[in-house]
Image (cartoon, rainbow, N blue to C red):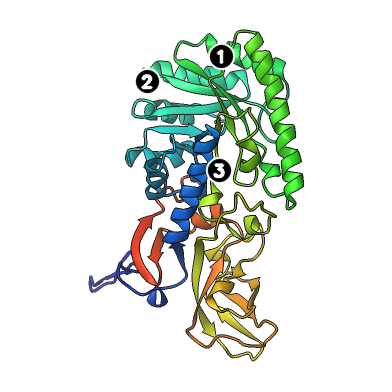
Amino acid sequence: MTICNDKSIALRLPPPALPGQFLSTVDTPSLVLDLDAFERNLGHMQERADQAGVRLRPHAKAHKCPDIGLAQIARGAVGICCQKVSEALPFVHAGIRDIHISNEIAGPGKARMLAAMALHARMSVCVDDVRQVAALAEACAQAGATLTVFVEIDVGQQRCGVGNADAALRLADAIANQPALRMGGLQAYHGGAQHRRPVTERREEAARAAAKTAQVLARLQAAGVRCDVVTGGGTGSVAFDLTSGVYTEIQPGSYVFMDGDYGRNEWEDALHFEHSLFIATTVMSVAASTRVVVDAGLKSMAVDSGLPLVWRALGANGLRYVAANDEHGIVEAGEDGTLPDLSAQLLLVPGHCDPTLNLYDDIIGIRGEIVECLWPVSARGLSR
């Protein structure tokens, strides 16, 4: 950001941190990534997918950061997912060549944008209406592009996707009649299953989703429709999706960070990820004896999935973040009554990582207590 006054003096906002700087001196509020925990999360997920013989296509809507997408691909991911067409643009520019838009699109403008990207990368998208098929085919014909299309089925989310095999078959036939389109397979994602707290409930929901997917798949195959890929699943259900025998590809996203909401899930020991993403915040007021005020509020985090957690690993002594205002956060003492002093730095675990990332320009990567890198959140705000 550059500000010029009448005397033409340029003022520039400095970066929140520089490599080699101590974490304690990072300007706040800032988004901080523990690189050691992050890399363990990447390796653990890739290892489990490889063991199951299932392809890993992580969801980039969780991080919106090409550096993270490239790190996932370097470890064996086949590509990434994006949720919006515009969101995929920075990843194409970064050299990622296999991107699935795990969503339906509406309007000729988005179809043209997607067709244009298909000239530079292997692009795929979901449909649940024959009119979407026609719009995609027209855009690809005009651009001279080829696009892979997945039929999305509703396996319990009650959002997008067709509800039965007959509707899926009609869509598959419509795709087959368009020379610029290729049938990729099925998408079956149950977002509502991801945050069921007990492991048993998530397992049951995942099993129901897999069973319905298997029924639709069998019907399509009996009709001669080839489905090379069945894609779906998420961080909360991935342990069950990998062993379902139905999914050939999984789409977890939040596992790289593990936000506060996912942290409240009950997890099996065999597949458990670490908190790696934090909001660095500074105590800006200690005027009240029973609380302190920090500089991270609603404009620094999403609270749709709950308020952030004060990271206990830093000796926070049970501090509780109890209220978020626009620019302020209220933190109360734990059982011992201890409160941090003015200018003390705290690390918060955001309740929901995806929309929190959308509030920041950079992710500050730390190794131990030292800043190692700054990664731009290049897809921030790209929600078209």
Nearer-N-terminus badge (3/2):
2
Quick check: can you spot residue 383? no
Amino acid at circle 2 = Ala
The residue shown at (50%, 73%) is 281
Q: Nearer the viewer, residue 119 or 213?
A: 213
| Residue 338 placement (x, y as % from top left) | 62, 88
Q: Nearer the viewer, residue 45 or 190?
A: 45
Look at the numbered disc 3 and give the secondary structure of its residue: loop
State left or right for residue 100 relative to residue 199: left
Nearer-N-terminus badge (2/1):
2
Nearer-N-terminus badge (1/3):
1
Give the spatial CA distance, label 2 vs label 1. 26 Å
Q: Nearer the viewer, residue 69 or 367?
A: 367
Q: Please rate how many residues cluster around mark 3, counting C-alpha atoms within 10 Å: few if below 14, some from 14 to 19, many from 20.
A: many
Residue underneath mark 3 = 252
Q: Please rate how many residues cluster around mark 1, counting C-alpha atoms within 10 Å: few if below 14, some from 14 to 19, many from 20.
A: some
| Residue 133 placement (x, y as % from top left) | 55, 19
